[in-house]
Amino acid sequence: MKIWVDADACPKVIKEILFRAAQREQLELTLIANQALNVPPSAFINSIQVRSGFDEADDEILRRMNVDDIVITGDIPLAAEVLKKKGIALSPRGELFKESTIGERLRTRDFLESLRSTGEITGGPPPFDLRDRKAFSDHLDKSLRKKA
């Protein structure tokens, strides 16, 4: 099992949780982004910089991931593809994406995107807070225990 991170929009506090988990579990963690990233020196932690462009990081994650790998992303279409490949998709806010609900999540996302394209203001997500951090840590720990 490896952990892959769609790192461009991943909050710093979540990356720090992942760094500690990778060290503790001695598990490979790879952050993938369109920009250079600073990661702590570790045999278990690395980063890959991909070209700038739409879905470049997503495509790289999907090329490299395997069954049962964990992918950290807030990108619902990427989460859907991860689930198709039998991986685990977890958002930085602690939402564990599931096959039973991902179709509905995609439809909601597409609907909101169509509203925004017409000029409708749909608002954004609430600010990241301690509950999000705790939910993320809890789901990450459960996912790691399942595979141990």
Image: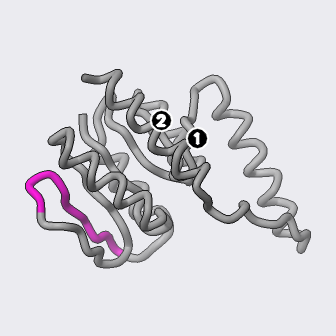
Count how many numbered circles sit on residues in the image.
2
Depth check: give the residue in front, 49 or 93.
Answer: 93
Is the residue marked by circle 2 packed among few (<14), some (14-19), or many (20+) residues within 10 Å?
some
Q: CA distance from mark 1 to mark 2?
A: 8 Å
Please, what secondary structure does the residue beneath circle 2 have? helix
Please, what secondary structure does the residue beneath circle 1 have? loop
Give how far across and how far down residue 129 sits, in percent: 61, 59
Q: Earlier in the sequence, mark 1 or mark 2?
A: 1
Give how far across and how far down residue 63 sits, in percent: 31, 47
Left or right, 70 with respect to 26, comes to right
**What is the image's colouring?**
one colour
In the image, which residues are magenta?
42-51
Give how far across and how far down residue 101 sits, in percent: 67, 29
Q: Residue at x 24, y 50 (%)?
A: 29
Q: Quadrant of residue 46?
A: bottom left
Residue 133: mark in rendering:
none
The residue that label 2 is drawn on is 139
> Which of label 1 and label 2 is nearer to you?
2
Left or right, 56 with respect to 44, comes to right
The residue that label 1 is drawn on is 95
| Residue 60 to residue 119: above or below | above
Assign the C terminus to one quadrant of the image: top left
